[in-house]
Image (cartoon, rainbow, N blue to C red):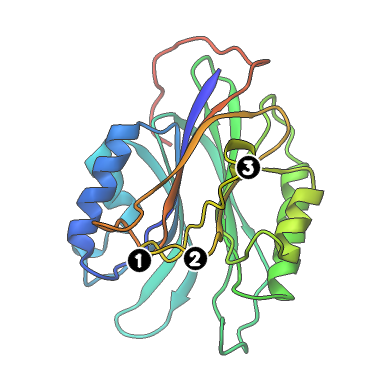
Amino acid sequence: MRLTVLSLNIWNYQRDWAARRERIAALIRDCAPDVAALQEVRRDPRYAFGRDQATQLARRTGLRRVYAPAMRYWRVPRTEEGLAILTPHTILRHIVVPLCWDGRDRFDPNRRIALHATLALPGGVPLDCWVTHLNQRPPIQDASAARLGAAIAACDTPLPPLLMGDFNAEPPARAITLLRESGLQDMWPAAAPNYPGNTYPAESPRGRIDYLFAAPGWDVVHMERVGVGGRMLSDHCGLLAVLANPDAVIASSPQGSDA
């Protein structure tokens, strides 16, 4: 079986969201992902009648969505920011896993979470998908990575789980090492071992801080960055990948109802 996966930090409402929203929606429609994992998803009453950005994109792409706020800002107007997963498949269940944060850290006082959604692929085969946006520096970042790795290792579904998002860490960082040591594979080196794959900033990427990880069992057929320079999707490049699991066979069946 094959899966198409997209991960993108959508940069909340920065820099002409109306135009970027249409470009992101067009990308999603064109690549038709099984999973689109989004970070920096805002709900703000000043925009789109208070609908969160995942709902706005779901309406433009015809996908189901689950959104989870990580941080609520208790100012007027009250806004929140979090994570989302868009998919054409039925969302069987989802949970929010709190990660580590330090509200006294002036550099990064934001609450951090992971969003875990179980999707029903055609034939009813469940797939565990995780998306996160890690703290900006250790040691909190490392503690979050360790907690996340342990939670994913505890998944017990037939297909190996996937993890994607903005990790705010370069490949040598301890947080990334911890995730690899938990048994997850960084899929970019598997796809392009001789190419750095930098993702930030999108206008002229100099660092790789956005990742797709997979538990053993998935092979990468194709992987690329999207939104590099030109007409920006975000301040981050997105990651678009096609994965294959040669041991998994799923039957074709009609889509279920929304979660």
Return the residue at label 2.
Answer: 206
Q: Where does residue 243 sit, x and y in percent of width and height?
A: 55, 29
Position in image of residue 123 (x %, y %): 52, 14
Q: Which residue is mark 3?
A: 193
Count every numbered label the image shows and give the total.
3
Q: Nearer the viewer, residue 239 or 16?
A: 239
Q: Name above or below for residue 102 compared with residue 176.
A: below
Residue 224, percent across and down? 45, 41
Of the image marks 2 and 1, the number of the one nearer the N terminus: 1
Q: Which residue matches tag 1?
A: 12
Residue 136: give x, y in percent of width and height.
Answer: 59, 74
Badge 1 crowding class, 10 Å Cα cut-off, few under 14, some 14 to 19, many 20 or more, is some
Secondary structure found at label 2: loop
Q: What's the residue at 58%, 66% (across, down)?
A: 168
Marks 3 and 1 close (CB-CB < 8 Å): no
Quarter of the picture holding the C terminus: top left
What's the residue at 45%, 74% (across, down)? 72
- Which element type, helix, strand or loop, lies under badge 3? loop
**Amino acid under label 3?**
Pro
Q: Residue at x 78, y 57 (%)?
A: 178
